Each structure stands twice: as structure tokens, then as C-alpha cells.
Amino acid sequence: MPFLSNRSNGDPGVNRLLATLPRNEYRRLLPKLKTVSLVLGDVLYEPGDVIKYVYFPNDSIISLISELSNTSWLEVGMVGNEGMAGLAVFMGVNSSSTRALVQGAGTAMRMSSAAVRTEANRLGSLHHLLHRYSHSLLAQVSQSSACNRFHFVDARLARWLLMTKDRLGAEEFPLTQEFLSNMLGVRREGVSKAAGALQAGKLIRYSRGVITILNRRGLEAKSCQCYSIIKGETDAYLN
Ligand SMILES: [Zn+2]
């Protein structure tokens, strides 16, 4: 029986991957898990850093960032309550290929990389779920990459805001234009224009670096289909 199965779908306060584990397996893992607070803007790993810990976000978000120069970087993946940051460890690699940046403050369950390796070698449910999560993250990264190349900025912004909202479980969160511009790989003027269009449609309010989602359905209608494709992949792997 899955642990907390009634809460595993849609409760932003619980990591859904851990919540999908059978109760006995979760209990065995519990002493190895520590609840930590992640602070907005913190860097958990830089590219090349040895990964000491993996993180299962509860209501925090970790962005996987690819840096091309000191001033140009792009979010290539997002890890929230559906997954785990530090997946390289499970793949048998010790170091991170991307920067892992806390994009949404909140809590996460932290586990040492050594413990993840030991658990994965048991070939139990965690091993199975991490395999499925690897596929889901790859699907997210591929879809986002195509989205960033082909879809309009306001549709991409709507997708990104929905993905963020789903993981934080909050209608309101701090967000600077500079940060958003790097997340989406768009100039600040482009972000400003797209946010202005969503605001004019009363889908969001954007004031003093805080985004408030006013109309979720409207935002879904504005987003490209990438949002539902990525959400579908995530929900499918957990079920
Ligand atoms: Zn798209």
C-alpha cells in the first residue's frame, strides 16, 4: 500500500515520490531522511560539484540551470514535489552537470548520496520509482527545450507559472524580472511585455517583484500544450 496514498496527488506539502513508496519501504528510509529548509537563491550544486546530498522537495522548487556564460544561463529543468534533485547519483555519476538553484523557498527531505546508492542497490520501490522519474524528467527537459525554441513568450510564461504554482502550492510568490528572464531565456523587455499581456487579461497580478495567480483556468488556456504534456508525464510516472 502506498504511504499516504490519499495525499500523494496534489498535496503540495508532501514529496509525491516519497509518498508513493510502500509504507514499509518509507519507514526504512525515514531515519536517513532529514527535513531541511531551502532558501530562495541558494545554490545546492554547481556544475562539477560532488553531490553529497539529494533533495526531495516538499513545497520548494529546485531549478536545474545550464550556464553558457557569466551573464547568460537558462533553466533546463525544474524539480519540485514530484521528484528529486541529484538524480546523477542514482545514474552512477558523482557530480552534477548543472547548477541546482533554489527557485522556490520551502522544505525538502534530504538524503546522503551514499544512502541513495545503498537503497537503489536493493532494487526495491525507490529504485523502480527513480527509474520512472528519470524518464519523466527527461520528458520535461525535452518538452521545455522544444517549447523555449518554438512557442511564444506569453504561452511559455503561462506554462512556467503553472508549473511553479503546482509545485509551490501557493497562488503568490516572489519573482524578479531578471530571474524570470533567465528562467525563460528571454530578454527582460520580452518578459515585461509577456507579463503585461497576462496582467491585462487579469490572469495574474505582477507588482513589486511578486506574482499573484488570479485565474488558473485562464492561464491554462493561455499556455501552450507543453504544460499539459509535462503534467501528464509527471502524473503518469507516479501512478
Ligand atoms: Zn510550449
Image (cartoon, grey):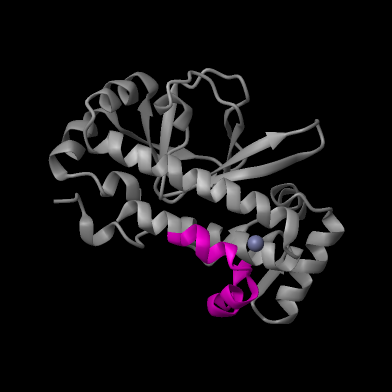
Magenta extent = 212-232
Compared with 118, 168 (above or below) is below
The structure residue drawn at horizontal position 51% and vertical position 66%, both measured from the top left corner, is 228
Q: Nearer the viewer, residue 131 or 158?
A: 131
Residue 5 at x, y = what percent? 22, 57
The structure residue drawn at horizontal position 40% and vertical position 27%, both measured from the top left corner, is 90
Quadrant showing the C terminus: bottom left
Majority secondary structure of magenta residues? helix
Residue 9 at x, y = what percent? 32, 61
Q: Nearer the viewer, residue 22 or 167?
A: 22
Outermost residue, right direction?
189
Left or right, 71 with respect to 81, comes to right
Q: Nearer the viewer, residue 137 or 95?
A: 137
Indicate the quadrant where residue 212 lies.
bottom right
The structure residue drawn at horizontal position 33% and vertical position 22%, both measured from the top left corner, is 117
Q: Nearer the viewer, residue 222 or 199?
A: 222
Compared with 103, 230 (above or below) is below
Residue 114 at x, y = what percent? 35, 18
Q: Quadrant of ligand 1?
A: bottom right
Compared with 2, 159 (above or below) is below
Q: Number of numbered discs present?
A: 0
Q: Is residue 220 magenta?
A: yes
Residue 49 at x, y = what percent? 57, 19
The structure residue drawn at horizontal position 62% and vertical position 32%, both measured from the top left corner, is 99
Left or right, 104 with respect to 203, comes to left
> Is residue 156 among the parts visible in the rendering?
yes
> Is residue 169 among the parts visible in the rendering?
no
Q: Is residue 152 magenta?
A: no
Left or right, 95 with respect to 207, comes to left
Indicate the quadrant where residue 172 lies.
bottom right
